[in-house]
């Protein structure tokens, strides 16, 4: 234990972390920069803050205040002690609706303030896109703005009083009229009035430098306002009194389409006289094709407010009439507006990938110019990009002249870093030429502070240094920011990563096969730190359960980054710190879809576990649950399901089994089905098979080789169809339209051994919809060419073909047994080799997979793990869910009219990988009304069964799933397509959840109902 750590532990009541994990979690923010701190302290109150400052001053160690860690310019990183306010000093102290003020602590997340203010018809004006995880302290430190700044200004406009502790321990309450000003500040300002009156550009988004002009007499001498945007360099904020504004009762969103972002930028300033709440702009590169925006190449999102929906709509339509647009759309539905705003808010993440998948980075993220100059500035900006061979997609606060952009800098090579510097210097000149600010929202940090002399001149920057000296004469607070800055091309977070690709098991196709590039995807926007789920989103359930950064997707990515760097985490794949952080990852894959940059922590976890346990003893759960298909198949072969169930019902024996298997003692062992789904199916079809064989024998066709001709005539519209030939000399044409569509039903482990009723129901419904359903082969079929080479046939020899079973490999993958997973998946591909033959073309059969997690594994994990086998991609493309099969192969089939409400939860893998559009449409067609909850059930396959995971698993279920089920009205159908979800419901709530197939099959048994018109 170091002297510094011991001294801090002696006086601080909050947590003091000098270990690898807390330090690794704070090496980076959302910028390009990285600094390794000595330690991290989570203070409980202002006394802790003062104690930390006293100890660090005595040891000469810098202090860096940190909120949500979403800063873009590097100001939330440091080499000394980091103060983490999110753990304890995160309360909303009070709210006064009459005075329209609130008292907040620095670690309070903005959305928590908004939620409390909303019932009073109030809100905090500024709202950055990171509102679900950014903190009020960070917003004050950066003088954040957000999309509504055209109406309600910056954070500085919303601050009334600030409680601050200076580096030397003085406690000040900052306000108007020199209230709280440190000694020497007033004299300094009054001696520089002329310089202060002429040295600051007038524009709504001038964030760069210190706001010393707020201390001018004609501006009211507001010390609290001047402190905003100081990036933790002047004092440590411990409490704030902030102003709230009246929220409109109704809103409308006008989406205005333009040819390109320059045209949109030219139009933005002209809309300000109409009093909009927002004038946001973005281009087509950042918009998914399914967004449903009006036709155009760029759009303005103009929000209007009113007392009624009609009033808000009328104002939005007035904006549309005043705008010269290609097309437009006015949305008043709150759900529709939220969906559109999510596109804009996710831009900070989606912009990190260019359309071709290459990386893009911040650094010149938010320059601002006078709104009337925005169009001209964008043209010059584009020209400068082109001259340097760079690309970027601008978006942002067009109404305030503030542009966000991520640029495809090469920050890995010396030449690329050199170009980054040259571009930065030249762009600073362009911004200044247009009368702008180097920072229009996110602060200067290390990214821009070096270039402040271009904007303010050397004399003004020298004045900033004197201001810093008055507040912090020892340069203790966040040194290297704003004044005396570190060079903008040093401390880059990429410089420590390996230059050669790391040897890995997965293919990482979106990252060029480079695991380092996959880890670099996390840029720190921290959407995974959202503390509540909205809509159907999933990410990140373990963080919401624990509130710990190391259990967020970002935290885990940071640890993996440090593992690859090897400076802080020094034992590579053997790291216990990385292992422990990944231990509570549910592998829900929510981050794969909900993370704006597509981080896939479930895959990274499997990769890590594969290497971590290579040649080492694995946890018992990896054997008991990771190899679950093998154990269940053994039970099936020995016909001992009833015996296993009986033994599991004996308390002491069950406890012993759980202890040996690494299973949580709180869990009940699932009961095995007395008869597997495949055995039931074979028994069901035995009589049909006998009848069919008798018919073939009667026709004299039983002993013939089943040759099939592949049509090669390019002019034949039936090209690639299979037709049965009578013999080699004579061929009878068969109208394939007379045959029902054929699909194969996949016998996943859970349906096969644990829930065969789901398979029975699915088979019933698929057949009722007119499909011919075949079992997925359990022996390898062989393809043989005819002597003329124009026909080929299939054969199987039951005596020589080894019986096997297809498997998606899910349990092996989730426990990191990737060598075993490869073997299982290759065996699966071998079994299906004939059905994946490229000669089948588009007629590769569809494989209907009922278990969402298994379908997701086949869709994504299979081709990424066996990226060298083309059959893997073909099988992945042929996998369909139950609802997709009905929609694709029985489009005219009408499901039974059930007319009942539903509740439950969309499976996390369904949400993240498969999508639930077909399921929604099927439910609607069947009259199943209501929305399913988001989040994760918390069981997540083996996760919730593993020892030590029960509490987190239950907390995840309590977030959305269990409350939704408890609040459901009588007669509500509880839908849960995943076996894990159904098991969680049964064990925690005593409720039986059902697969959608079971509900539809039940409707078929009840007979037809009169459909509503």
Image: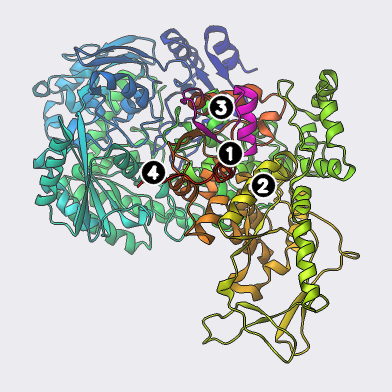
Instruction: State if disc 2 and disc 4 touch (CB < 8 Å).
Output: no
| Nearer the camera: disc 4 or disc 3 | 3
Provide residue 485's location: percent of width, then percent of height.
38, 36
Q: Which residue is mark 1?
A: 588
Q: In whole angstroms, how far apart are the C-alphas of marks 2 and 1?
A: 24 Å
Q: Rate crowding at label 1 as few (under 14), some (14 to 19) or many (20 or more) other CA atoms within 10 Å.
A: many
Instruction: State if disc 1 and disc 3 touch (CB < 8 Å).
Output: no
Magenta span of residues: 966-992
Provide residue 519's location: percent of width, then percent of height.
56, 45
Q: In whole angstroms, how far apart are the C-alphas of marks 4 and 1?
A: 20 Å
97 or 281: nearer the viewer: 97
Q: Which residue is mark 2?
A: 759
Q: Which residue is mark 3?
A: 957
Q: Which residue is mark 4?
A: 346
Q: Secondary structure at mark 1?
A: loop
| Nearer the camera: disc 3 or disc 1 | 3
Q: Secondary structure at mark 4?
A: loop
Mark closest to the chain's N terminus, 2 or 3: 2
Q: Secondary structure at mark 2?
A: helix
Mark closest to the chain's N terminus, 4 or 3: 4
């Amino acid at each position: 234990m170091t002297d510094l750590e011991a001294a801090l532990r002696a006086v601080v009541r909050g947590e003091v972390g000098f270990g690898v994990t807390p330090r690794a979690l704070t090496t980076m923010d959302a910028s390009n920069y990285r600094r390794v701190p000595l330690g991290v302290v989570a203070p409980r109150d202002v006394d802790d803050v003062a104690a930390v400052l006293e100890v660090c001053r005595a040891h000469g160690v810098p202090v860096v205040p940190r909120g949500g860690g979403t800063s873009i310019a590097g100001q939330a990183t440091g080499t000394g002690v980091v103060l983490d306010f999110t753990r304890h000093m995160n309360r909303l102290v009070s709210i006064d609706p009459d005075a329209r003020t609130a008292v907040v602590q620095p670690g309070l997340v903005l959305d928590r303030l908004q939620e409390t203010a909303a019932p009073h018809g109030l809100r905090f004006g500024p709202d950055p896109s990171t509102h679900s995880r950014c903190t009020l302290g960070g917003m004050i430190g950066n003088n954040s703005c957000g999309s509504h700044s055209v109406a309600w200004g910056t954070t500085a406009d919303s601050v009334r009083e600030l409680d601050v502790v200076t580096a030397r321990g003085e406690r000040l309450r900052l306000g108007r009229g020199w209230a709280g000003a440190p000694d020497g500040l007033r004299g300094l300002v009054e001696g520089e009035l002329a310089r202060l009156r002429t040295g600051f550009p007038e524009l709504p988004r001038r964030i760069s430098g210190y706001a010393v002009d707020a201390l001018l007499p004609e501006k009211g001498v507001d010390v609290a306002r001047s402190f905003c945007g100081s990036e933790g360099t002047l004092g440590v904020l411990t409490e704030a009194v902030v102003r709230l504004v009246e929220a409109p009762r109704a809103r409308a969103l006008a989406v205005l389409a333009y040819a390109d972002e320059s045209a949109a930028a030219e139009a933005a300033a002209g809309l300000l006289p109409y009093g909009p709440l927002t004038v946001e702009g973005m281009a087509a590169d950042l918009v998914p094709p399914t967004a449903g925006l009006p036709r155009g190449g760029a759009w303005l999102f103009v929000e209007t407010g009113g007392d009624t929906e009609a009033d808000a709509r009328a104002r939005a339509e007035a904006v549309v009439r005043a705008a010269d647009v290609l097309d437009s759309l006015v949305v008043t539905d709150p759900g529709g507006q939220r969906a559109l705003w999510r596109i804009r808010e996710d831009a900070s993440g989606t912009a990190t990938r260019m359309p071709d998948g290459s990386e893009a980075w911040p650094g010149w993220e938010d320059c601002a110019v006078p709104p009337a100059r925005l169009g001209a500035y964008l043209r010059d900006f584009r020209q400068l990009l082109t001259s340097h061979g760079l690309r970027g997609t601008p978006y942002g606060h067009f109404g305030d002249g503030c542009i966000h952009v991520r640029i495809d800098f090469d920050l890995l090579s010396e030449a690329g870093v050199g170009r980054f510097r040259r571009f930065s210097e030249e762009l600073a000149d362009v911004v200044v030429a247009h009368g702008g600010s180097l920072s229009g929202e996110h602060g200067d940090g290390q990214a821009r502070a070096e270039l402040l002399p271009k904007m303010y001149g050397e004399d003004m920057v020298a004045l900033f240094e004197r201001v810093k000296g008055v507040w912090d004469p020892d340069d203790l607070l966040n040194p290297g920011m704003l004044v005396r800055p570190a060079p903008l091309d040093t401390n880059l977070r990429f410089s420590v990563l390996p230059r050669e690709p790391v040897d890995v098991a997965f293919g990482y196709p979106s990252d060029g096969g480079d695991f380092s590039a996959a880890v670099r995807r996390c840029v720190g926007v921290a959407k995974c730190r959202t503390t509540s789920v909205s809509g159907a989103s999933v990410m990140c359930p373990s963080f919401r359960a624990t509130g710990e950064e190391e259990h967020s997707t970002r935290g885990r990515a940071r640890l993996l980054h440090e593992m690859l760097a090897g400076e802080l985490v020094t034992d590579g794949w053997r790291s216990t710190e990385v292992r422990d952080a990944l231990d509570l990852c549910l592998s829900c894959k929510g981050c794969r879809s909900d993370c704006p940059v597509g981080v896939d922590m479930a895959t990274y976890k499997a990769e890590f576990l594969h290497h971590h346990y290579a040649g080492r003893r694995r946890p018992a759960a990896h054997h008991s649950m990771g190899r679950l298909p093998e154990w269940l198949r053994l039970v099936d072969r020995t016909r001992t399901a009833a015996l296993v169930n009986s033994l599991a019902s004996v308390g002491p024996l069950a406890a012993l089994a759980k202890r040996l298997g690494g299973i949580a003692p709180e869990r009940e062992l699932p009961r095995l089905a007395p008869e597997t789904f495949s055995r039931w199916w074979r028994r069901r079809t035995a009589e049909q098979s006998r009848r069919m064989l008798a018919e073939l024998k009667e026709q004299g066709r039983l002993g013939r080789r089943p040759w099939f001709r592949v049509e090669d005539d390019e002019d034949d519209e039936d090209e690639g169809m299979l037709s049965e030939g009578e013999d080699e000399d004579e061929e009878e044409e068969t109208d394939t339209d007379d045959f029902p569509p054929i699909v194969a039903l996949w016998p996943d482990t859970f349906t096969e051994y644990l829930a065969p009723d789901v398979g029975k129901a699915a088979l019933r419904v698929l057949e009722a919809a007119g499909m011919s359903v075949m079992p997925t082969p359990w022996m390898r079929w062989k393809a043989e060419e005819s002597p003329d080479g124009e026909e080929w046939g299939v054969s199987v020899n039951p005596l020589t073909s080894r019986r096997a079973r297809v498997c998606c490999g899910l349990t092996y993958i989730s426990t990191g047994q990737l060598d075993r997973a490869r073997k299982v998946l290759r065996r699966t591909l071998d079994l299906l080799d004939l059905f994946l033959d490229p000669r089948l073309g588009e007629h590769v059969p569809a494989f209907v997979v009922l278990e969402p997690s298994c379908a997701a594994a086949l869709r994504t994990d299979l081709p990424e793990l066996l990226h060298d086998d083309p059959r893997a991609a073909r099988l992945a493309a042929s996998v369909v869910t139950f609802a997709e099969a009905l929609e694709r192969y029985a489009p005219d089939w009408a499901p039974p009219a059930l007319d009942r409400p539903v509740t439950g939860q969309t499976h996390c893998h369904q949400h993240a990988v498969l999508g639930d559009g077909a399921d929604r449409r099927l439910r609607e067609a069947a009259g199943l009304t209501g929305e399913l909850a988001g989040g994760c059930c918390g069981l997540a396959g083996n996760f919730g069964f593993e020892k030590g995971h029960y509490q987190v698993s239950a907390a995840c279920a309590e977030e959305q799933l269990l409350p939704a089920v408890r609040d459901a009205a009588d007669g509500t159908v509880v839908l849960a397509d995943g076996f894990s979800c159904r098991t969680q419901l049964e064990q925690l709530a005593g409720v039986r959840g059902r697969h959608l197939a079971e509900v539809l099959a039940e409707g078929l048994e009840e007979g037809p109902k009169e459909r509503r018109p």
